[in-house]
Image (spheres, rainbow, N blue to C red):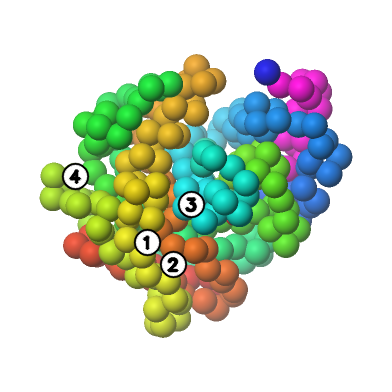
Amino acid sequence: MTTLTPDTIAHLAAHLERAELEAFAVDKITDDHPGMDEDDAYAIQHEIRRRKIGRGARIVGYKAGLTSRAKMRQMGVETPSYGFLADYFAVPDGGEVAMAELIHPKVEPELAFVTKAPLRGPSCHMAQVLAATDFVLPAVEIIDSRYRDFRFDVNSVIADNSSSSRFVLGGRMGRLEDQDLPSLGVVLEKNGEPVAFGAGAAVLGHPASAIAMVVNLLGRRGEELPAGSIVLSGSITEAIAVQAGDAVTMRAQGLGSLSVRFR
Ligand code: 0L1
Ligand code: MG
C-alpha cells in the first residue's frame, strides 16, 4: 500500500529522473517525505521506468542492489533492492563513459545472468533461476546515486532506481554447468592497479539468490522477469569511486576480462 498520492509519486519521479538526465545532485527525498514506505519507493521507481518507456527506451533487465551483508547492515535492511536497466545504460566493453553525463560514479564488479525462460515470483528460488539461465557474463556496474554525497536511506535509494546508471558486459559467456559461482574469483583494477578482490559468495552466499530476490520483488507487483533479460547480481566487492581519466578492468576467473574508461 502506498502512502503518497499519485501526484506526489509522479512529481518525485520527474524530480529524480531530471537529476539523472541532467546529472545534478539532490537531497534525499525522505527529508520532505519522512513517512514514505517501500511501496511508495518502488512506485516512484516504476514511474521513472514508465516515463522512459514512454520516450522510447527499452528495458533490458534489472539489477540487484545492496546484496552484501555489510551494505544491508549499514542501510539497516533485511532484504536487498532492485532497479531496472534501460537500453541506454549499456556501455560496450572497452568503451568510454563521459563524466559530464554522471554525478559521482562508482564501479562494482558483478555477474550478469542472461535468462532463456520467464521467471515469476513470489516464491522463485535459486534452482529455478539456474534452470532459467542461458549464460553468465562478467559485468561492471557503474552506480551513480542522484543524492548529494551518496547520503540516503533505503527508500530514497529504491525510488532513485537503486542508483542504476550504466553497465558494461564483457569477457566470455559462461555456461552454468561449467561454473562454481560462489567460488568464482574476481579482481577489479583501476589504472592497472588491483583495487578490490572477491568471490561470488559475497553476493548472498550465491549470486543466483540475488536474481531470485529480484524476481520475488517484481512478483509482489504482479510482474514477471521476461526471457532474454539481463540481471546484474549485485557487487562482489565494495564500490570504487572513479574520476575522469580512470581506466577500470574487471578480471573474472575463467570468464575473461572487460574494461571501461572515464573521460
Ligand atoms: O548496486 C548497488 O548495490 C547500489 C545500490 C544503491 C546504494 C548505493 O548507491 O550505494
Ligand atoms: Mg550494483
Seen at 78% across and 42% down, the residue is 29
> Contact, CB < 8 Å: mark 4 with mark 1?
no
* Amino acid type at image mark 2: Val
Q: CA distance from mark 2 to mark 3?
A: 27 Å
Which span is picked out in magenta? 2-16
Mark 1 crowdedness (10 Å alpha carbons): few <14, some 14-19, many ≥20:
some
* Amino acid type at image mark 1: Asp
Instruction: Please tell me whether residue 6 belongs to the stretch shown in magenta.
Output: yes
Residue that protrudes farthest toward the left in the picture = 178
The first of marks 4 and 1 along the sequence is 1
Q: CA distance from mark 1 to mark 3?
A: 29 Å
Left or right of 230 in this view: 180: left
Numbered-mark total: 4
* Residue on which disc 2 sits: 260
Seen at 33% across and 54% down, the residue is 201
* Residue on which disc 3 sits: 69
* Residue on which disc 1 sits: 93
Q: Residue 257 in the image: state x and y as whole percent.
A: 29, 66
Q: Residue 11 in the image: state x and y as whole percent.
A: 80, 32
Between 262 and 206, the one lying in front of the other is 206
* Amino acid type at image mark 3: Arg
Mark 4 crowdedness (10 Å alpha carbons): few <14, some 14-19, many ≥20:
some
Which quadrant of the structure image shows residue 101?
bottom right
> Contact, CB < 8 Å: mark 2 with mark 3?
no
Q: Main secondary structure of the magenta part?
A: helix
> Contact, CB < 8 Å: mark 1 with mark 3?
no
* Amino acid type at image mark 4: Leu
Left or right of 138 in this view: 174: left
CB at mark 1 closer than 8 A to ligand 2?
Answer: no
